[in-house]
Image: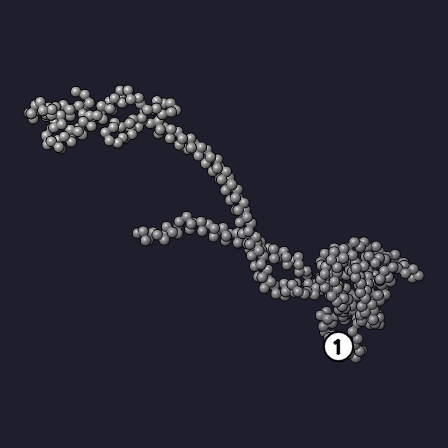
């Protein structure tokens, strides 16, 4: 039965229960720290890796200047020290004015977040040039963080090709599945970066079509495409692998810091408890030691004051010490009754020893006390019995 219950006792022993509790606490703490590690990685990812593509629609304004223009807000989508490729997308019809226009310039300006929009005068004088890169709005150099100008042109098609295409796609044009328009993608900048600092990140984008008021545009849109490199490229293109690596790293770091903090707190509290215990122990030991010492001294004095009988050599009477309650021990006076009784008892015992010796030597009682007056055995026996009674009782 003991062999059967031994594993149960081992499994339910105090060290085993403590191990179970520690394991359970470790699992709970590890799970919480793992959740914190996942949350930390997600927060780190969205703060460190910017949006790869940012699109903003630009609404062009006509009749406010020599050229159509538009301004759009970029909010806080861009980040510093991140290369961007900037594109403009124009949806323009293949109308005769646009085809006859030929090449025309597109001017893009990225403005600071502190820029305040001021509309241009309704009738600007040609003799009075407007300051700024575009000639439409009054812009200062501090407002412009980045500027670029690129040409564009509608795709050329000959009359024969254009007529043949229209005839073949006529049903699609009739059904509205195809339109006589073209979408132009114009790259305005490659790997454009912005210095560190909130004021150095553009907050607005302004587009100007330097083709006069006759240019026709369906829609305009600006696109910022981030060009990742290094750690951002790894985190964006290998998301699962980077998630596992960084989450594990965060979790291990949290576990290590938690263990170090727990050991530090435990050491601090254990040190404080030991100091308190030592102080209490010293106080207790001091008081107990003092009591013990006083008790020991008292015990020694009590032992020395206790009445005692000391043996002696030979036929001398034993010495007896009786305390009088004073500090110095005193020995009983030889004239006291007790001492006399002890003396008589000692002498009687000595006489018994002499009688025993006499019996051994003479072979009969009273051999030493026989003076030769009487030779009868009864007299010697009576005297020996009397002496024996004296030695036993001390009195006749």
Give the x, y percent position of residue 139: 84, 58
Residue 39 is drawn in which quadrant?
bottom right
The colouring scheme, among rainbow, by chain, secondary structure or one colour, is one colour
Residue 321 image point, x, y percent:
31, 26
Q: Eyeballing the image, is 373 above or below 3?
A: above
In what quadrant of the picture does the C terminus appear? top left
Question: Is 341 placed left or right of 110 in the picture?
Answer: left
Q: Is residue 38 above or below residue 349?
A: below
Residue drawn where x is 72% and y is 61% of the image: 81
The residue pinned by badge 1 equals: 165
Q: Is residue 105 left or right of residue 27?
A: right
Given residues 382 and 393, the one toward you in this image is 382
Image spot of residue 260 (x, y percent) = 55, 51
Residue farthest along the bottom direction in this orientation: 160
Residue 288 or residue 392, whichever sits in front: 392
Q: Is residue 101 left or right of residue 82?
A: right
Question: Which residue occupies the foreground of this view, 50 or 315?
Answer: 315
x, y percent for residue 101: 84, 70
Q: Which quarter of the figure has residue 356?
A: top left
**Which structural element holds mark 1?**
helix
Which residue is at the far left? 376
Q: Nearer the viewer, residue 165 or 378?
A: 378
Q: Residue at x 53, y 42 (%)?
A: 272
Q: Residue at x 41, y 48 (%)?
A: 14
Q: Residue furthest front?
A: 372
The answer to which image quadrant residue 164 occupies is bottom right
Q: How many marks?
A: 1
- Report the residue that reaches farthest toward the right: 127
- Compared with residue 278, is residue 386 higher up or lower down, i.e. above or below? above
Is residue 26 in view from this perspective? yes
Q: Residue at x 81, y 66 (%)?
A: 149
Question: Quick one: label 1, few (<14), some, or many (20+) residues within 10 Å?
Answer: few
């Amino acid at each position: 039965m003991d062999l059967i219950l031994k594993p149960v006792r081992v499994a339910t022993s105090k060290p085993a229960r403590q191990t179970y509790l520690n394991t359970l606490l470790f699992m709970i703490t590890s799970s919480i720290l793992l959740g914190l590690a996942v949350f930390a990685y997600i927060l780190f990812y969205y703060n460190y890796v910017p949006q790869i593509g940012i699109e903003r629609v630009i609404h062009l304004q006509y009749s406010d200047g020599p050229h159509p223009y538009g301004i759009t807000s970029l909010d806080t989508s861009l980040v510093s020290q991140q290369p961007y490729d900037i594109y403009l997308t124009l949806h323009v019809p293949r109308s005769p004015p646009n085809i006859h226009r030929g090449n025309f310039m597109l001017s893009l300006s990225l403005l600071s977040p502190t820029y305040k929009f001021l509309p241009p005068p309704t009738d600007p004088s040609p003799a009075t040039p407007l300051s700024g890169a575009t000639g439409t709005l009054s812009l200062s150099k501090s407002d412009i963080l980045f500027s670029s100008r690129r040409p564009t042109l509608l795709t050329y098609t000959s009359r024969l090709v254009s007529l043949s295409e229209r005839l073949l796609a006529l049903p699609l044009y009739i059904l509205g599945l195809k339109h006589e328009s073209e979408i132009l993608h114009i790259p305005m900048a490659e790997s454009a970066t912005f210095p560190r600092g909130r004021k150095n990140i553009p907050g607005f984008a302004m587009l100007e079509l330097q083709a006069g008021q006759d240019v026709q545009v369906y829609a305009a849109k600006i696109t910022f495409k981030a060009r990742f490199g290094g750690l951002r490229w790894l985190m964006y293109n290998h998301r699962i692998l980077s998630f596992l690596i960084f989450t594990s790293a965060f979790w291990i770091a949290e576990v290590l810091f938690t263990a170090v903090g727990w050991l530090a707190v435990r050491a601090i509290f254990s040190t404080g408890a030991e100091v308190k215990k030592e102080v209490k122990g010293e106080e207790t030991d001091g008081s107990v030691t003092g009591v013990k010492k006083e008790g020991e001294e008292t015990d020694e004095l009590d032992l020395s004051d206790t009445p005692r009988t000391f043996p002696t050599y030979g036929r001398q009477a034993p010495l007896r010490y009786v305390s009088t309650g004073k500090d110095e021990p005193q020995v009983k006076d030889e004239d006291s009754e007790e001492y006399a009784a002890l003396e008589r008892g000692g002498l009687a015992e000595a006489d018994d020893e002499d009688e025993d010796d006499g019996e051994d030597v003479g072979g009969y009682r009273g051999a030493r006390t026989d003076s030769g007056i009487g030779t009868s055995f009864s007299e010697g026996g009576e005297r020996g019995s009397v002496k024996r009674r004296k030695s036993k009782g001390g009195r006749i």
